[in-house]
């Protein structure tokens, strides 16, 4: 069914993008499908900000910071011990007031929670938020490329709650491993992700040692299967695709030695390191195929085969169709996406083009729910409002999608039920009310709704906005309407 061009533009901004900008839907001119394809050709933008740093720099700063904290804690314990057991036999309550002040001051020495100086973990997170909410999430005409970054970052999920080093480099991980490859070959994306220090630290592969490797230290260090399991279960083949526990164990042995350099004696600190001493020697068999011992190349060969496996194509196709089209993906669309994936050797630009050209992707009914991150981005784009990074993190936390903090390596859920709970909608109401209350008082809510929702705007929503008692209430109703929250 052919759609009216205005309707198609509104639908593209909602379903494939991040919503319209301040000037509304009419600002997006031309054939919208060609505009989407142009964003594929352009690739994902890199966030622009002078305070964004690369992984090696951030890890070096984080390790230095941890050393400083450890020294502060050690000094604090020494001061506490000295105060509790004074050498002169004077009890703490007998000390002069000056000494008590010094003792209280000693307890306030910097630690993980009280250091007020530079904090590379906190500073890195705020810099990444500023770069996205002042740039890549706000400036695109449509935002399909940015939506793909969000999709793949969630597919290859990490969590900043894992550790301070992971938290410090989570933004660099997205910038270095994901953004350059979202419209490239899947096997290149896969290799970039699995060899990035962030993923290696998050899934504990830096601790994994081959049982028969020189580094096993008489069995004191052992095999860790976390990364191997999640690569097969989440990143490539998917659950129920035919691999076994034995395949996971063999693959875990193959990628022993995949680690992160800490000293100049290895590789450049903070970069990927293949530690041959920790690598399990010998041939390994995975899903019926034997992989000869070839050091790093052994693991690269397994990843290449997993990336090209039909089960991987189906798994990726299903997730893309679920994210952009429906919670229950149309089987015909999944089949076409999977076929394009296999026929093009995992060319994600070709797969994305197939998605855009699919008739199932242009059904007028809005069935999906914007995630909190998508919703906040859309609201800020529409209103032109700017928020401090701390306010954005608070809003994301309240809505249930804390910044780069999914509950597990399977990422945040991608279904309507996950985001349409009463509690989730209540927190969106608070956010919308705050934005509406701070809006330009000359903005007419009826004009705002028509401009930003266009043909998607229902008569019911338009009437509710028209009946609003105040401008702020009218704008809130527009931002909380099904047409704005769904896509």
Image (spheres, grey):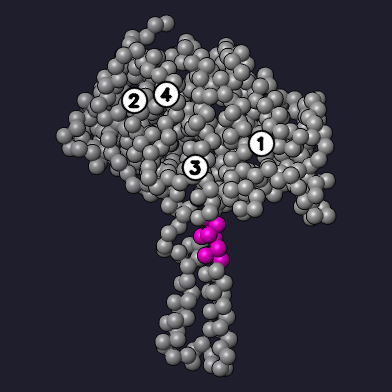
Task: Provide residue 87's location: percent of width, then percent of height.
Answer: 58, 90
* Residue that extends furthest to the front in the rendered view of this protein: 265
Residue 422 visible somewhere in the drawing: no
Question: Which residue is identified by label 3?
Answer: 172
Q: Determine which quarter of the picture holds residue 86.
A: bottom right
For the residue pair 457 and 237, the one nearer the viewer reads as 237
Residue in view at x 57 percent, y 78 percent: 78
Please give the range of residues in magenta: 62-70
Circle 1: is it few (<14), some (14-19), or many (20+) Cα within 10 Å?
Answer: some
Q: Is label 2 in contact with label 4 (beta carbons under 8 Å)?
A: no
Tell me: 411 left or right of 242. left
* SS class, disc 4: helix
Q: Earlier in the sequence, mark 3 or mark 2?
A: 2
Q: Earlier in the sequence, mark 2 or mark 4?
A: 4
How far is disc 2 from disc 4 in space, using C-alphas? 12 Å
- Disc marking residue 42: 4
How far is disc 1 from disc 4 in space, using C-alphas? 31 Å
Tell me: 311 left or right of 95. right
Question: Which residue is identified by label 2?
Answer: 141
Quarter of the rendering occupied by the C terminus: top left
Tell me: 79 left or right of 258. left
Task: Provide residue 448's location: percent of width, then percent of height.
Answer: 24, 27
Task: Provide residue 34's location: percent of width, then percent of height.
Answer: 39, 14
Circle 2: is it few (<14), some (14-19), or many (20+) Cα within 10 Å?
Answer: many
Residue in view at x 49 percent, y 92 percent: 94
Q: Earlier in the sequence, mark 2 or mark 1?
A: 2
Q: Earlier in the sequence, mark 3 or mark 1?
A: 3
């Amino acid at each position: 069914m052919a759609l009216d061009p205005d309707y198609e533009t509104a639908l593209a901004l909602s379903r494939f993008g991040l919503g319209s900008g301040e000037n509304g839907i009419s600002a997006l001119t031309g054939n919208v499908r060609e505009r989407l394809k142009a964003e594929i050709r352009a690739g994902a933008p890199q966030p622009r900000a002078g305070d964004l740093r690369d992984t090696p720099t951030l890890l070096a700063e984080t390790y230095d910071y941890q050393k400083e904290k450890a020294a502060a804690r050690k000094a604090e314990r020494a001061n506490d011990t000295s105060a509790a057991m004074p050498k002169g036999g004077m009890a703490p309550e007998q000390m002069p007031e000056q000494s008590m002040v010094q003792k209280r001051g000693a307890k306030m020495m910097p630690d993980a929670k009280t250091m007020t100086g530079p904090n590379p973990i906190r500073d890195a997170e705020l810099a990444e938020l500023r770069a996205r909410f002042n740039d890549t999430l706000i400036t695109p005409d449509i935002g399909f490329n940015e939506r793909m970054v969000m999709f793949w970052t969630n597919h290859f999920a990490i969590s900043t709650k894992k550790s301070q080093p992971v938290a410090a480099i989570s933004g660099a991980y997205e910038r270095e491993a994901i953004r350059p490859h979202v419209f490239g070959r899947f096997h290149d994306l896969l290799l970039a992700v699995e060899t990035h220090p962030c993923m290696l630290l998050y899934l504990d592969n830096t601790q994994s040692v081959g049982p028969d490797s020189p580094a096993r230290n008489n069995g004191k260090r052992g095999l860790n299967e976390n990364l191997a399991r999640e690569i097969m279960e989440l990143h490539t083949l998917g659950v129920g695709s035919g691999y076994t526990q034995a395949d996971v164990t063999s693959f875990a042995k193959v990628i022993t030695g995949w680690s992160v350099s800490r000293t100049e004696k290895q590789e450049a600190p903070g970069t990927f390191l293949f530690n041959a001493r920790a690598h399990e020697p010998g041939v390994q068999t995975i899903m019926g195929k034997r992989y000869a011992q070839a050091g790093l190349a052994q693991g690269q060969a397994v990843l290449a085969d997993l990336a090209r496996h039909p089960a991987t194509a189906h798994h990726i196709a299903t997730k893309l169709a679920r994210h952009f089209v429906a919670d229950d993906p149309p089987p015909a669309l999944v089949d076409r996406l999977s076929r394009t994936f296999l026929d093009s050797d995992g060319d994600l630009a070709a797969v994305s083009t197939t998605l855009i050209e699919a008739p199932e992707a242009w059904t007028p009914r809005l069935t999906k729910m914007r995630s909190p991150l998508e919703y906040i981005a859309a609201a800020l784009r529409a209103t032109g409002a700017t928020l401090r990074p701390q306010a954005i993190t608070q809003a994301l936390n309240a809505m249930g999608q804390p910044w780069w903090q999914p509950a597990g390596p399977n990422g945040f859920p991608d279904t309507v039920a996950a985001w349409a709970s009463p509690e989730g909608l209540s927190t969106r109401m608070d956010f919308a009310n705050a934005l509406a209350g701070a809006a330009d008082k000359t903005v007419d809510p009826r004009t705002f709704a028509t401009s930003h929702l266009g043909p998607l705007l229902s008569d019911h929503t338009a009437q509710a906005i028209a009946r609003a008692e105040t401008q702020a209430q009218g704008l809130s109703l527009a931002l909380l309407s099904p047409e704005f929250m769904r896509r």
